[in-house]
Image (cartoon, rainbow, N blue to C red):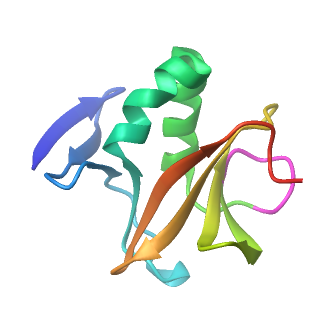
């Protein structure tokens, strides 16, 4: 695993399995860490540009938020296929979809145009 410092003291970890994780946990929501899959993280700069990629990182850091109008992690009720969470950024319909795998929330799919 590799540790990288992003925006001052925020620590992210990239695993050999291709996952990027921030050091924030939300154990009350059924997962210990929230990660963006490494390949998706790399693709985000191409898909949405560097400013919006950085907004996704900030939203991941924020953690669980309400269902409307906030940047952060949203619990999907009901789930969308296998995905139980979305990572959203305010002012954008673009989303990252994730699910809990072995106690880790992994965001692994990009959706352009939102879920609705």
Q: Is residue 113 left or right of residue 34?
A: right
Q: x and y percent of residue 23 in the render? A: 31, 55
What residue range appears in magenta? 66-72
Q: x and y percent of residue 60 in the render? A: 51, 48
- Closer to the camera in the image, 12 or 35: 35
Position of 107 relative to 77 (above/below): above
User: Could you tell me which residue is drawn at 81 percent across and 53 percent down?
Assistant: 115
Q: Quadrant of residue 47?
A: top right
Mark count? 0
State whether the magenta stretch is mostly helix, strand or loop.
loop
Q: Is residue 37 magenta?
A: no
- Closer to the camera in the image, 113 or 77: 113
Q: x and y percent of residue 37 in the render? A: 37, 49
Q: Is residue 60 left or right of residue 12?
A: right
Position of 84 relative to 30 (above/below): above
Q: Is residue 21 left or right of residue 116?
A: left
């Amino acid at each position: 695993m590799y540790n990288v410092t992003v925006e001052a003291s925020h620590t992210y970890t990239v695993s050999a399995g291709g996952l990027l994780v921030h050091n924030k946990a939300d154990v009350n929501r059924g997962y210990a860490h929230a990660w963006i899959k490494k390949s998706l993280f790399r693709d985000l700069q191409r898909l949405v540009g560097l400013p919006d990629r950085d907004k996704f990182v900030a939203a991941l850091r924020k953690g669980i938020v309400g269902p409307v109008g906030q940047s952060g992690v949203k619990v999907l009720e009901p789930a969308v296929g296998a995905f139980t969470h979305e990572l959203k950024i305010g002012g954008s319909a673009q989303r990252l979809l994730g699910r809990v795998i072995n106690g880790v929330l992994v965001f692994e799919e990009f959706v352009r145009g939102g879920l609705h």
